[in-house]
Amino acid sequence: MTTTAVSPVLLLTAVVRRVERLSPSFVRIRLGGNGFEHLGPEGPTLDQRVKLLIPSPGRPAPSALLDPDGWYAAWLALPEADRGHLRTYTARGVEGEGDDRQLVVDFVLHGHGPLGAANPLGAGGAAAGPAGTWAARAAVGDEVGLLAPRRGHEHAFGGIEFDPGAAGRLLLVADETALPALASIVESLPACTRGVAVVEVPDATDFLDVRFPAGIERHWIARGARPRGEQTLAVLRERLDLHPERAVADASSLGPSTDLDDAVWETPAHSSSGDDVTASRRARPRPGDRDTYAWVAGDSDTVKACRRLLVGERGMPRPQVAFMGYWKQGRSG
């Protein structure tokens, strides 16, 4: 008797169930539909990544044309008009059971106009891309393709990087694109968790309602017209006692990179540079850092600056940090 292997990849056509404007820069979209009873993960979503297949205007979601096995090659083989756009997002949450099970995704929107208003620039000055444009115009009943983990097969699907192990203290850093993941993470933490969270968003109206454990010291930053990441670095330097007066000099290197393929992705298990992270340990980390785990996500230039600060200057062991460039200035989302 043969058993057919079940793919860990759940390929669905997701239907918009609800659209909720959270702030000028954020809209929350709840997705459901046929097959969502099999949607994972089973436990907390943490920073679970999923992929959305954004249909081209006037075209159906391309998920109906694909199979979970070999989906990417098949998607690339589609005519450009049918293919749409592939984008990666983090889940804000997975809620409900059976026919009512839904995926919650928080999208960063474009500018401060009414929901659905066109704007060539995104929140924080980023270029408006197909996913943000779709989210800004989304209405109940719209469809989008979804690739997500199948319940019970989350490990094979992957997509969760937050892994603090036995660390007793957390350092969490995010911009607006990583805020949904950070929010999902902190809302899953035990009430006794200690640490620091630094969140930089376009405007004070984007300070969202996130339930932090009492032991997490929160720093909400409204970027305004100041350079992206400048204030985040200043707060980190102050909290880590690393010469706060150098923050402005650090920020001078935060301009858009000319290399759009310069990926920044390094976790305790993997590095985009190809380095063996587990074998790379600083000889003399500060005693307090031995018990600290850092999770840093957002635009690649700021993430790189944080990596230089925490690992290069502070000397935090690389196996105790996760640095993830979710996007790059100059590349639309």
Image (cartoon, rainbow, N blue to C red):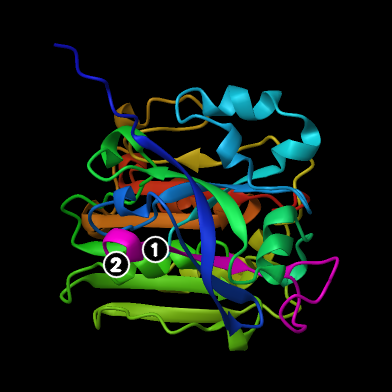
The residue carrying pointer 1 sits among few (fewer than 14), some (14 to 19) or many (20 or more) residues within 10 Å by Cα, namely: many
Callout 1: SS: strand
Which label belongs to residue 57? none
Which label belongs to residue 96? 2
Where is residue 291, by image quadrant?
bottom left
Task: Indicate left or right for 162 with 146 as reference.
Answer: left
Callout 2: SS: loop
Q: Position of residue 232 (x, y in %)?
A: 55, 69
Where is residue 86, by image quadrant?
top right
The amino acid sitting under disc 1 is: Gln
Query: In the rendered structure, which disc, 1 or 2, sits on the residue that comes first in sequence?
Result: 2
Between 254 and 333, the one nearer to me in the picture: 333
Q: Which residues are magenta?
A: 96-122
Q: Main SS of the magenta segment?
A: loop
Q: Residue at x 70, y 61 (%)?
A: 134
Q: Residue at x 63, y 40 (%)?
A: 62
Read off the residue under disc 1. 102
Quarter of the N terminus within the rendering: top left
Task: Indicate left or right for 45 with 139 as reference.
Answer: left
Q: Position of residue 64 (x, y in %)?
A: 57, 39
The residue carrying pointer 2 sits among few (fewer than 14), some (14 to 19) or many (20 or more) residues within 10 Å by Cα, namely: few
Q: Residue at x 26, y 38 (%)?
A: 153
Asked if the residue under mark 2 is in contact with the one under mark 1, i.e. CB atoms within 8 Å, the reply is yes
Q: Is residue 125 above or below residue 218?
A: above
In magenta segment, residue 107? yes
